[in-house]
Amino acid sequence: MIRRKVLHFTAHFQVFFLFFCSMNTVENSLRTLAAQFLSGLVPGGEVSPAQVLLNPIPADFEGDVSVVLFPFLKLTGKRPDELGEALGAFLQQNLCEIGSWTLVKGFLNITFTPEYWTSLLKDVYAQHQRFGLREATADAPNVLIEYPSPNTNKPLHLGHLRNIFLGMSLSRILEATGQRVTPVCLYNDRGTNISKSMVAWQKFAHGATPQSTGIKGDHFVGDYYVKFSDLYKEEVKALMAEGKTEEDAKKQAPCIQEVERMTVAWEEGDAEVRALWEQMNGWVYEGFNESFGRLGCRFEKNYYESAVYNLGKETVAEGLEKGIFFRKDDGSIWIDLTDAGLDEKVLLRSNGTSIYITQDIAVAYEKQRDFNYDASIYVVGNEQDYHFKVLFEILKRLGMKASDKLYHLSYGMVELPTGKMKSREGTVVDADVLFDGMIQVARETAAEQGKLEGLSEAEKEHLYTMVGNAALRYFILRVDPKKKMIFNPQESIDFQGQTGPFVQYTHARIASILRQGGDIQLKDGYVPHPKEVQVLATLGRFGSVIQTAADKMDPSALASYVFELARDFNQFYHECPVLKESDEAARMFRLALCASVGSVLKNGLYLLGIEAPERM
RNA sequence: GAUCCCGUAGCUCAGUUGGAUAGAGCAACUGCCUUCUAAGCAGUAGGCCACAGGUUCGAAUCCUGUCGGGAUCACCA
């Protein structure tokens, strides 16, 4: 079970991302000028640049960008063609980048001059390796991000992969907008589930260890968790055969009672139980660390439920004093959130012990102490939407600093074509198995292609890992996080079409050209080909796509972008020779375009957690 | 029962604060490798944007209702 999943993006969080990244200075000028002109036509009114709607233009029409006139017809009392003519003439007069314009219905379609495109390429190429990216300043906001927060009784599965891919990608995206990002992980390392693995190990292992069996630690422990479930099922069945009700049988099964005793013993600090717990968790962490290592994620700090599960009590006591919480007759402590559209919520059991949310309150303060964050993101599945609404509301009422900068990145579940993953039915897709499988497919595909002669074995293996990783990560990240997604193992290993390997392939192609291309010296006076304009237009969007992805906490925006850029480039590639181009100005323009696209693809892939190979 | 999320091509998904003829990829069919990497490119076919109303110059997008799918509503995590 993943600790958490996420959903809505609060408006106030976006206040954070102050800078509205606008690389598109021409579009800004366009808006400003249009607003200025339109304001003059509206009696007593004012049109702001933001009100000017700029649209992309459908393929069949001429032009680079379109001003939508409809919103201003009523305001100005003019007909579309009348307003369009006037606005078009005004804009062309005042913006030298505008080459021509046409009017189609209520749309003023503007075409930029060739000089605009060549100067755009000059700009992009000049900064191409850092184009679209921002460096964090020393006083940049410090954003804490928590993921994937697994339980320590089972290995990672497909659901964790979505979590990890989102967490990693979002971290990098936020960094690319100039923020400082601190990744942390919270381990749910105690309680009933962990006790189950321990009980089963005592019963069945006869002292076996990951070392003695050669099984990866997290899988080793997970196997005993499964063994426990099987045993439990049998015992329940046996009791029911003796005539007990299912409810009673589930409570009275000897093994589950042993689990309860074990959990109590753990809480009482029983030395033997603690030692076993340390040992088994140690195996799990070894396994997790291996998985995290090859997935490329690392954490600034680890938090453990076992260390904090009792810590929330003080905070709850303070809240009680302040009258934010109240005590019921049985001694349990509650908060009434009905005025916020939520329910009453228990914070402390009647016996004084803490529950899940108590722990979360504690961890929120711990994080604040440790990192003094400006914002805190929890990457957790959408099944916990309600939990986080409650948690954030509580923290707000407690008056915690930055309590208005807490964000639940809620993502939907991953399902299989056959339905949901169910551990009971053995349909859970294991993360390690899946990852290995992807690499194997990459290996086989590369063997079929046979383009890798000259690479060492180590380089080849690295490449297979890159490509397998790309296929898997892209397949998952291209879907809007908040939506549930269907994971089809067959399609996920596809390397054609809208896939990670397709984008990688495009990068490798570009790298190949650049290796043979020589020095690049841009020349003046070149008039770009339509396909080149198309590539440049897409290239220019990179910065704003990153910003959108950051604002919405949605890497899928970037996944789409990277694919579109690669697709545009491939079209250009098929129509415009680069190395074989005899005209010097054209060849230089194209080489610079290749270099720029190569860098943006590489950086864009990086933001998704994908490496860009030089060959493939 | 209450609350929240989702419903777009056969399949998987895009679709900016409402804007032009709803887009990709996969699968299917047709072409293109003596030319910079064919993991590519070009083309054909595929749609009552779940359904019904409403708002407006204009709705896949906003509102209401219906149907279908999912999640949550524990002194579980």
Image (cartoon, helix red, strand yellow):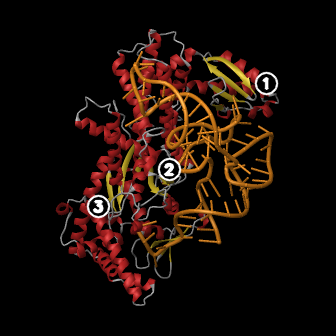
**Element assignment for label 1:** helix
Q: Earlier in the sequence, mark 2 or mark 3?
A: 3
Give residue A259's quadrant in the image: bottom left
Residue extending farthest bottom: A243
Q: Quadrant of the N terminus of chain A?
A: bottom left
Along the viewing direction, whichever of A16 and A504 lies nearer the viewer: A504
> From this viewpoint, is residue A16 visible?
no
Along the viewing direction, whichever of B24 and A612 lies nearer the viewer: B24
Q: Position of residue B19 (x, y in %)?
A: 69, 36
Q: Position of residue A294 (x, y in %)?
A: 30, 47
Q: Name the residue under label 3.
A: A219
Q: Which of marks 1 and 3 is nearer the N terminus?
A: 1
The residue depicted at 48 percent of the width and 43 percent of the height is A555
Q: State which mark lies toward you, 2 or 3.
A: 3
Q: Mark 2 points at which residue?
A: A481
Q: Mark 1 points at which residue?
A: A81
- Label 1 marks a residue whose chain is A
Amino acid type, residue under disc 1 in the picture:
Asp
